[in-house]
Image (tube, rainbow, N blue to C red):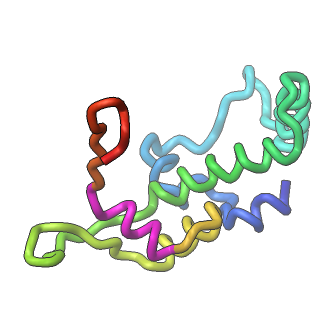
Amino acid sequence: DRNLHQKFALSDDPMDFYLLAQTGETIVDNEGGMKDDRKEWEETINSLETVDIFQADQEDLFRIVAAVLHLSNINFVQSNVNGSDGCTVSDQNTLYRVADVLEVNPEELEYALTHRTLTTMAAGGGVE
């Protein structure tokens, strides 16, 4: 779907995503025949609807897949953070693209990706 491609900043070239480029393979053997993207897309949507996953939930699912693809392109560089070894995101454009796809604040996303958070449980199950 061209609208989802644009909405989630997806490329037509799978090699643009680190996660997909790892195998070096970009052609899917569709049971020995040529792939038909439109037909495969329609089958995917029909299959999702068959199991009661409709448009709003489908979009959330595609948003997650797009975010994972974009997240695979984020690189980190070692840096000194508050006097300790740490890291920062090296490409802010990619970070902002992921934040846009996930509809989150880019600064908060960067913090979540570069800082360790430890949550402990108190006696009785309360969060400390």
Residue 108, picture quadrant: bottom left
Magenta stretch mostly in which secondary structure? helix
Over which residues does the magenta segment extend? 106-116
Residue 8, picture quadrant: bottom right
Q: Residue at x 79, y 34 (%)?
A: 34
Instruction: Give the percent coordinates (x, y) of residue 52.
Output: 87, 27
- Is residue 96 found left or right of 53 in the rendered image? left
Instruction: Give the percent coordinates (x, y) of residue 79.
Output: 17, 75
Instruction: Give the percent coordinates (x, y) of residue 36.
Output: 84, 38
- Relative to residue 31, is residue 95 depicted above or below? below
Instruction: Please name whichever residue, 27 or 124, is drawn nearer the observer in this view of the structure.
Output: 124
Q: Is residue 113 magenta?
A: yes
Q: Residue at x 30, y 38 (%)?
A: 121
Numbered marks: total:
0
Residue 45, picture quadrant: top right
- Relative to residue 15, is residue 106 depicted above or below? below
- Is residue 43 found left or right of 13 in the rendered image? right
Q: Is residue 114 magenta?
A: yes
